[in-house]
Image (cartoon, grey):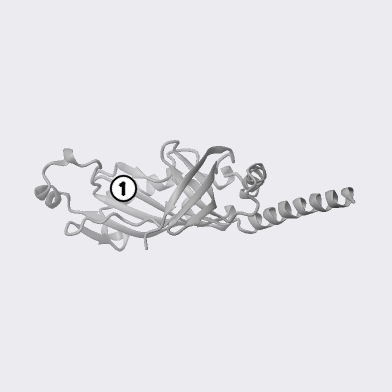
Amino acid sequence: MHTSRMNKLILFSLLCLLSFKTYSQKNLNIEGKYNSTSRLHGFDKKIETLNSIPETIKIILNNNLNELLGDLKNHAVFHEGLLIDLDSYFNENPYPSIRKWIVAKYQFIYIISCSEIGLSKYYLKIKMDEYGQIIECNWPKRSYNSKNKFEPIESITESLDKWVMENSLEEKKYSTELKYNEKLDKLCIVFSFSMNKKGNKESIKAIEFDWLNGLKVDEFSSTKITVY
């Protein structure tokens, strides 16, 4: 009788593991959060088409995309842009030292989608000054420029499965997000598990993998607050 119960328990554990692996591998397409231009009302103008910007800036932008994305550039589509009137802005805001950011002349948003590597959608944002120098970009400066370099997501979910078993998270719901880790200059896949939810507060336990080599770069807990 004891042996029968033990066998049932082992079978149940295996079913939980297989259920999780099946679920995780059916959801291989990943997506980044929506990223829009940063408006400066009264001083900005939308860039509807790249033909409206100076030719020199267009060439520099294209060169930057080639260097950053490599063969993924063919999967990047211009989404929107913004042009800031710096002269007018600084005439009314003459003390830049009190700000904690640099006001960019140009902002460009591209949407990258590539089913070959399991990328559903990622909003690439590039900010440039009036000379075409990159001020800010949510894509690593080097190495993430070839589809063949990216670790297959199936391999990453295998590492995820082991971590899930170690932390007894088989029954927890989770979400995925493609995220630029600015501190490490890496493009990472973050798996966030909902641990507890009460009112507008939700406790999250997450693990983050470098998409280039599939290695874990971080593991953390946080609280998500939803504003209604």
* Residue at the (29%, 41%) spot, across then down: 133
Q: Say above or below: 95 vs 112.
A: above
* Residue 9 locus on image (x, y percent): 79, 51
Q: Name the residue under label 1.
A: 127
Tally of numbered discs:
1
The secondary element bearing badge 1 is classed as strand
* Rendered image quadrant of residue 29: bottom right
* Residue 111 locus on image (x, y percent): 43, 57
Apparent side of residue 147 relative to residue 81 in the rendered image (left or right): right
* Residue at the (66%, 41%) spot, across then down: 166
The residue closer to the viewer here, 6 or 168, is 6
* Rendered image quadrant of residue 210: top right
Apparent side of residue 10 relative to residue 17 in the rendered image (left or right): right
Which quadrant does the C terminus fall into?
A: bottom left
Q: Which amino acid does label 1 sit on?
A: Lys
Q: Say above or below: 49 vs 11.
A: below
Q: Say above or below: 228 vs 143.
A: below
